[in-house]
């Protein structure tokens, strides 16, 4: 064999002992002792469980001498204090990957209460704050809360003046840790419904015991006055069975009870008579506490009334309502679990960064899976020295692995020499994989499947993922790197590759799956693929694996998918600002082994010298683009001020719904029908129903049957939870082989006559459209012109009801417009706008259609107004600034939001106001909508595949409310 092996090894499953369980779950490495988790001394303990065969293997050490390095991060900016930092483990990093599934009980999630409960708890927060200047609660407290603070301060002063009243209990409290003093109030306090105050305590700074006691008494006293009609424990239990809003109100306001026994149950100092024989000082103290409780009750009641009236006024009043300053949220974003699967070592660094670096820097569990060994021609040398070098494919594969380990170690720890544990595990497909765990950050894992690569971007190579997919070979052999702990060679069939990936997903239980673009298209002139064949055929294997995982594995969390553009990035405008591009290039410099120092101790080399002449590739380090899921129209409202959100989870469209302006959220509910691609858009029809559009992928019985088509589903009636079956609009592509099924997500709009139309970019980079007829049928896919179109088009209607369609090219933006509602689109028109990054957002504004996009090489947001009175025209393009991010921008009312540098959500809540950054990292694009006349709602789906929503009054001086997660933590559907 050319690679130095005497012959192919056994096919997967031939002589390889099965060591996996019911779903292929690796019985030899349970969640607590496999990917990313060690035993006490850092060694894997493999337990075959029921098979009775234990294997205790000493994994190889991958130690290098320490080279200090200071990892650079984007310059910090002002943040919205929406959530506390993620809790860290005992070694300073977040809990190890998958350990939350086994070790201990997950930390209880702080719930984000309704505004009314927030107002009641703000009294306790204020009283518990001894005056810390940088406290988020203190900095954001509205003026109405100061009454409670003054009352609590007077209580503390009075209590300090009577040290004898503190006694042994006060001494014990003073000696307790901070967490205990904040949360342990006894069973009686928990039954008394002080849940709201307890939640506020968990985020408050440590205070003296006297101040904490005064705060709790003030909160209980205020709550007693709020609901005098609810009595006893039975009323509290009834409140517990009510809606979340009613429960929060009841818990924040425990009932007033009579008599000594009732007073003891309530725990309120105002109901407890002085002890028999108490001193005059104690009696005075009791009277003072009653006064404090009364003040707190009055303040809480006033805040409830004010905030309730303000919420209603924001929906219907003609005068814009103003939200209070930002408050600390009670919702801690779940970091989620990320699995990213790529064809070659370095695909993740070139095409998924900076998302990869953001996730690692934030401490998220990340597992990167490499399908092939990336052995290429086996020459680890620059182009100038390649001719004289001797090919050695196993050694070159090892050098690329060394480069990846160094790059990941540097991203995670700042030290490229940080040690790894390398070991071998069996796969569900019957072969073996190498798993590397970063010792200093064990939530960072690398999984090497080590199959052969094609070695050419588009040539016909049967022994490749492409050949395996199309049936040109029955099995694809492994290509083991020179120092891998995997010693037994294997070969996989098409189904075994899929099952291997399903097994990886079962083990890691991801909430976000990242992989490459399965439909990249071809160049119009040469008809060659715009991406490497390993990239998109590898992505198709992942597509099939995620579909099988979603269908066959029930005990798992929901997951979202993110796809990435590959080689074609080099032909598009740069999406990253210089600092982000520099950080990305820094990882590639490490991977390329520029200094040639043998820091890894390997004869094969410590990096990939093929790319060392130009680590940036074809400008790939200057940009990043999502192949799908860039639309910002997935959140919408109805006539009753309810909210609807539509995102793809588990290959199905998930629906979240909030009925009315203050109803309880429900969801995610998955609409029937699988195979949905990332990205769904919603449009409201003329009769008030909502229609959801997207694309769907089907595999078919033969490889040539692979197909991507436009589909839609319509709400049964306005406001109904039910949607009809998915209906297909087909595809303008005739066959997968022609353009690799490369169509965009549909842009959909309803014009002034109620006519519905859908538009896509086709594989030839032109615009196609279908228009619904009066009888409900659809016309054919029409060619509408345009060339060099990229990304997905957008559509909106102007003040006269005329539809516009806009699309980005590599150099500018072009558009189409109806001359009048109901008429066909006019000709493609150049807008004269400068080049933009790919994602566009459009909405009807100011009589025309306003367009938002980003400035290349900057990340700044720009906007322009387009009108169609005398042909398509552009008016006053404006630069709105930003936080140097990339990707789609959503805009509704005064709110503007998009991804910022660092991966979090950045937002501007008024013209000219500084941009702020939330703690949320998310999948795809944000979305926003107006609710009623004067409220704006904003939503994202986090990396935990969970919906997060916030809102703001549509006023120049408004702020975003705290983020609210919808539903429980994402465990199993």
Image (cartoon, helix red, strand yellow):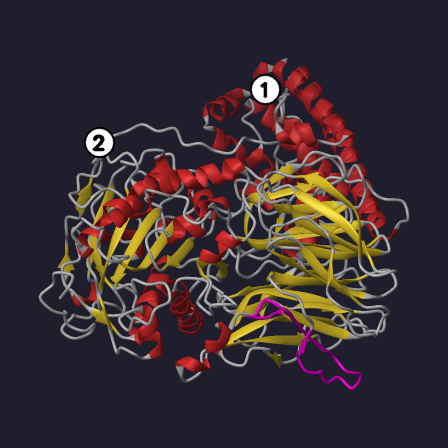
Q: Is residue 712 left or right of residue 33?
A: right
Residue extending farthest to the right is 318
Q: Secondary structure at mark 2?
A: loop
Residue for badge 2:
65
Residue at horizontal 32 percent and vertical 49 percent from the top: 445
Q: Secondary structure at mark 1?
A: helix
Residue extending farthest to the left is 6
- Provide the residue span drawn in magenta: 761-783
Q: Is residue 963 left or right of residue 597?
A: right
Q: Is residue 683 left or right of residue 459?
A: right
Res. 494 visible in picture = yes
Earlier in the chain: of badge 2 and badge 1, it is 2
Total tally of numbered discs in the picture: 2
Judge by depth and name the residue closer to the eye, 246 or 857. 857
For marks 2 and 1, give the CA distance: 61 Å
Residue for badge 1:
165
């Amino acid at each position: 064999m050319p690679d130095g092996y005497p012959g192919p090894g056994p096919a997967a499953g031939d002589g390889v002992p099965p060591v996996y369980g019911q779903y292929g779950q690796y019985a030899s490495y349970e969640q607590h002792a496999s990917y990313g988790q060690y035993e006490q001394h850092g060694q894997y303990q493999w337990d075959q469980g029921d098979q009775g065969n234990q294997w205790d293997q000493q994994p190889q050490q991958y130690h290098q001498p320490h080279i200090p390095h200071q990892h650079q991060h984007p310059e910090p900016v002002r943040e919205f204090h929406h959530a506390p930092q993620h809790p860290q483990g005992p070694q300073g990093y977040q809990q190890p990957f998958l350990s939350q599934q086994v070790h201990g009980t997950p930390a209880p999630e702080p719930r984000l209460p309704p505004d009314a409960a927030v107002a009641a708890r703000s009294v306790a927060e204020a009283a518990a704050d001894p005056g810390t200047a940088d406290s988020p609660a203190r900095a954001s407290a509205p003026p109405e809360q100061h009454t409670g603070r003054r009352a609590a301060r007077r209580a503390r002063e009075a209590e300090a003046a009577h040290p004898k009243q503190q006694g042994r209990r006060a001494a014990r409290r003073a000696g307790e840790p901070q967490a205990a003093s904040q949360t342990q109030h006894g069973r009686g306090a928990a039954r008394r419904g002080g849940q709201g105050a307890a939640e506020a305590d968990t985020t408050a700074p440590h205070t003296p015991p006297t101040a904490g006691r005064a705060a709790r008494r003030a909160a209980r006293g205020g709550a007693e006055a709020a609901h005098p009609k609810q009595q006893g424990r039975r009323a509290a239990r009834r409140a517990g069975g009510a809606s979340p809003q009613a429960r929060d109100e009841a818990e924040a306001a425990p009932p007033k009870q009579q008599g000594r026994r009732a007073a003891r149950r309530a725990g309120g100092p105002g109901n407890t008579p002085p002890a028999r024989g108490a001193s005059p000082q104690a009696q005075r103290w009791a009277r003072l506490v009653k006064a404090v409780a009364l003040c707190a009750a009055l303040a809480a009641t006033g805040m409830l009334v004010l905030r309730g009236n303000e919420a209603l006024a924001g929906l219907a009043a003609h005068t814009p309502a103003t939200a209070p300053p930002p408050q600390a949220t009670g919702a801690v974003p779940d970091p989620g679990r990320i699995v990213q699967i790529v064809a070659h070592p370095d695909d993740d660094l070139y095409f998924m960064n900076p998302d990869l670096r953001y996730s690692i820097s934030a401490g998220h569990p990340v597992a990167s899976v490499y399908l092939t060994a990336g052995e290429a021609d086996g020459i680890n040398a620059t182009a100038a020295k390649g001719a004289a070098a001797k090919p050695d494919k196993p050694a070159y594969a090892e050098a690329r692995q060394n480069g990846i380990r160094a790059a990941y170690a540097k991203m995670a720890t700042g030290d490229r020499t940080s040690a790894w544990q390398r070991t071998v595990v069996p796969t569900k497909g019957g072969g073996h994989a190498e798993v590397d765990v970063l010792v200093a950050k064990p939530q960072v894992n690398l999984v090497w499947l080590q199959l052969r690569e094609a070695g050419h971007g588009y040539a016909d190579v049967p022994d490749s993922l492409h050949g395996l997919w199309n049936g040109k070979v029955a099995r694809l052999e492994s290509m083991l790197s020179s120092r891998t702990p995997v010693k037994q060679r294997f070969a996989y069939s098409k189904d075994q590759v899929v099952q291997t990936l399903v097994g990886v997903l079962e083990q890691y239980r991801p909430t976000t799956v990242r992989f490459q673009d399965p439909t990249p298209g071809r160049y119009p002139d040469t008809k060659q693929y715009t991406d490497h064949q390993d990239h998109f055929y590898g992505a198709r294997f992942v597509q099939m694996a995620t579909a099988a995982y979603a269908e066959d594995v029930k005990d798992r969390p929901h997951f979202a998918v993110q796809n990435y553009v590959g080689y074609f990035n080099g032909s598009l405008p740069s999406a990253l600002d210089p600092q982000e591009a520099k950080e990305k290039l820094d990882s590639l410099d490490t991977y390329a082994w520029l200094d040639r120092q043998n820091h890894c101790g390997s004869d094969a080399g410590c990096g990939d010298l093929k790319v060392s002449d130009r680590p940036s590739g074809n400008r790939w380090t200057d940009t990043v683009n999502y192949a799908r899921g860039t639309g910002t129209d997935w959140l919408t409202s109805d006539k009753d001020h309810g909210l609807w959100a539509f995102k793809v989870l588990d290959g199905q469209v998930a629906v979240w719904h909030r009925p009315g302006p203050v109803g309880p959220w429900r969801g995610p509910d998955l609409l029937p029908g699988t195979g949905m691609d990332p990205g769904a858009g919603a449009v409201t029809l003329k009769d008030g129903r909502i229609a959801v559009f997207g694309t769907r992928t089907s595999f078919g019985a033969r490889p040539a049957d692979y197909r991507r088509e436009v589909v839609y589903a319509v709400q049964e009636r306005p406001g109904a939870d039910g949607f009809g079956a998915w209906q297909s609009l087909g595809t303008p592509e005739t066959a997968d082989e022609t353009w690799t099924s490369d169509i965009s997500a549909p842009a959909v709009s309803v014009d002034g006559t109620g006519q519905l139309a859908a538009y896509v970019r086709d594989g030839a980079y032109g615009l196609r459209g279908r228009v619904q007829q009066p009888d409900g049928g659809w016309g054919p896919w029409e060619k509408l012109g345009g060339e060099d179109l990229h990304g997905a088009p957008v559509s909106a209607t102007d003040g006269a009801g005329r539809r516009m369609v806009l699309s980005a090219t590599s150099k500018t933006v072009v558009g189409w417009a109806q001359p009048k509602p109901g008429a066909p689109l006019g000709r493609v028109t150049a807008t004269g706008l400068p080049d933009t990054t790919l994602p566009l957002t459009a909405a009807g504004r100011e009589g025309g259609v306003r367009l938002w996009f980003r400035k290349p090489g900057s990340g700044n947001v720009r906007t322009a107004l387009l009108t169609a009175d005398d042909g398509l025209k552009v008016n006053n393009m404006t630069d709105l600034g930003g936080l140097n991010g990339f990707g789609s921008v959503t805009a509704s009312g005064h709110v503007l939001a998009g991804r910022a540098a660092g991966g979090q959500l950045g937002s501007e809540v008024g013209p000219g106001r500084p941009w702020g950054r939330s703690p949320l990292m998310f999948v795809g694009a944000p979305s926003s909508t107006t609710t009623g006349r004067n409220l704006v709602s904003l939503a994202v789906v986090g990396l935990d595949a969970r919906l997060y929503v916030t809102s703001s009054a549509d006023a120049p001086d408004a702020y975003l409310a705290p983020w609210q997660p919808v539903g429980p933590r994402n465990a199993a559907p």
